[in-house]
Image (cartoon, rainbow, N blue to C red):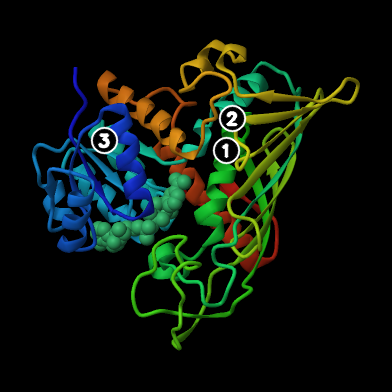
Amino acid sequence: MGFPKVAVVGLGFMGRTHIQSLRRLGVEVHGVAGISEDEAMAAAQDLAIQKWYRSFDEAVADDEIEVVHICTPNALHFQQAKQALEAGKHVFCEKPLAMTPAESGELVDLAKKKGLVTAVNYNLRFYPICQEARARIAAGDIGSPYLIHGAYLQDWLFLKTDWNWRLEPEQGGDLRVVADIGTHWMDMVMYLTGLKITEVMADFSTVHPTRMKPAGAVETYSSKINQNTSDNEVAINTEDVAVILFRFDNGALGNVSLAQVCAGRKNFFWFEISGSNSAMHWEQENPNELWIGYRDQPNQVLSKDPSLFHPEVRALTGFPGGHPEGYPDTFVQVFRQFYGAIASGKMPETGKFATFQDGHHEMVLCEAIQRSVVEKRWVKVDEIPG
Ligand SMILES: NC(=O)c1ccc[n+]([C@@H]2O[C@H](COP(=O)([O-])OP(=O)(O)OC[C@H]3O[C@@H](n4cnc5c(N)ncnc54)[C@H](O)[C@@H]3O)[C@@H](O)[C@H]2O)c1
């Protein structure tokens, strides 16, 4: 059986990454939609895609399309996912799933009602060595986790002149670093350990209370190359830095530092999980190695090698040992799972790709974190409706 036909909406950093990775799997990207007909046409020509749509509505009305990939700014996810589900399409949506838990909850219900396959792109789960870490944690290798800590730091919004749509709450949401990169980190540690975050305590800072907004759109990560000489100074109301404390449902404590203004840190995601037997540490910028720490024997570094992995993880690894796998490969693996679910006609059991339910849980966590900052206290996640 062949793959269903796909439309990709949003043609920036993510849209193009989705298209490349879908092609590696053999999935046909039948048509594309962007912010304008011109953007869609240019991308279709550039990427040799058959069809471009004048609008998202036109893409969703195309009867040949069975799956929609949503790669637009955050504020559009809810409406576009809802419309695609109502039109009977399976939906693969970029993170965060929506702007509020009310919106994401509505999408969870609608997806269930329609019986369609849905995913949110927490793709970092699919680094092969993270899958292996998960299998080892489930097998009891590190014992009972009691400290789960880490960071996700970037520098692409370091300067006051750096700009992107994420800086505007009406496009990116009321939370910036937490929703944009923090949700990746929270998804990862809960996925790896099987634990749930039950309480949060957070504080934020905005390093640049004003920024220089250029006239046109600035593509993600491109500020360093395109000099911004704008004299339009605008107020910034979202966080450049977030520090969050966590309590997990087994009693473990955790903390993460999140920022997009840390000089020299490009995409510095790391976690360390300390347990009663040993510890594990991983860094996204060196994704093929997992550090394993011991008290009474020499520490180890496990290099990615499917022949040393748990059997179920081998199937999620694209290349043999000694052949590094990176960020684009995670998309191929998550799409493989997603299209496998479509072929089987049902959502997978938990523990594979992030579902709309997982995406909704991240929105609930975001709301709890925001409440904690406003009310300056620990907030229990179950205080948040949803
Ligand atoms: N999973 C990941 O690792 C990851 C990484 C980066 C971004 N993202 C997510 O992907 C999404 C897109 O981010 P990006 O970095 O690609 O942004 P981007 O600015 O590079 O691209 C956004 C695209 O959406 C288009 N667009 C804007 N309004 C539109 C509309 N009304 N209809 C159709 N298209 C429209 C823009 O023209 C642009 O092509 C965000 O939600 C972001 O959080 C995820």
- Mark 3, mark 2: which one is toward the viewer? 2
**Label 2 – label 1 distance at C-alpha:** 9 Å
Q: Secondary structure at mark 1?
A: helix
**Label 3 – label 2 distance at C-alpha:** 33 Å
**Any part of residue 152 in sight:** yes
- Mark 2, mark 1: which one is toward the viewer? 2
**Any part of residue 354 in sight:** no
Q: Label 3 amino acid?
A: Lys
Q: Is mark 1 within 8 Å of ligand 1?
A: no
Q: Secondary structure at mark 2?
A: helix
Task: Give the label on residue 188, or none.
Answer: 1
Ligand 1's quadrant is: bottom left
Task: Give the label on residue 130, or none.
Answer: 2
Q: Are marks 3 and 1 in contact (CB under 8 Å)?
A: no
Across and down, in percent, residue 253 comes to 75, 42
Could you tell whether 284 is left or right of 353 in the image?
right
- Residue at 32% in and 24% down: 341
- Residue at 12% in and 43% down: 50
Q: Is mark 3 within 8 Å of ligand 1?
A: no
Count the marks.
Answer: 3
Which residue, given by chain and number where applicable, does mark 3 sit on? 113
**Label 3 – label 1 distance at C-alpha:** 28 Å
Could you tell whether 16 is left or right of 65 in the image?
right
- When the figure is inspected, residue 36 is found, relative to residue 281, above or below; the finding is below
Q: Residues within 10 Å of mark 2 (few under 14, many from 20)?
A: many
Across and down, in percent, residue 91 comes to 28, 40
Q: Are marks 2 and 1 in contact (CB under 8 Å)?
A: yes
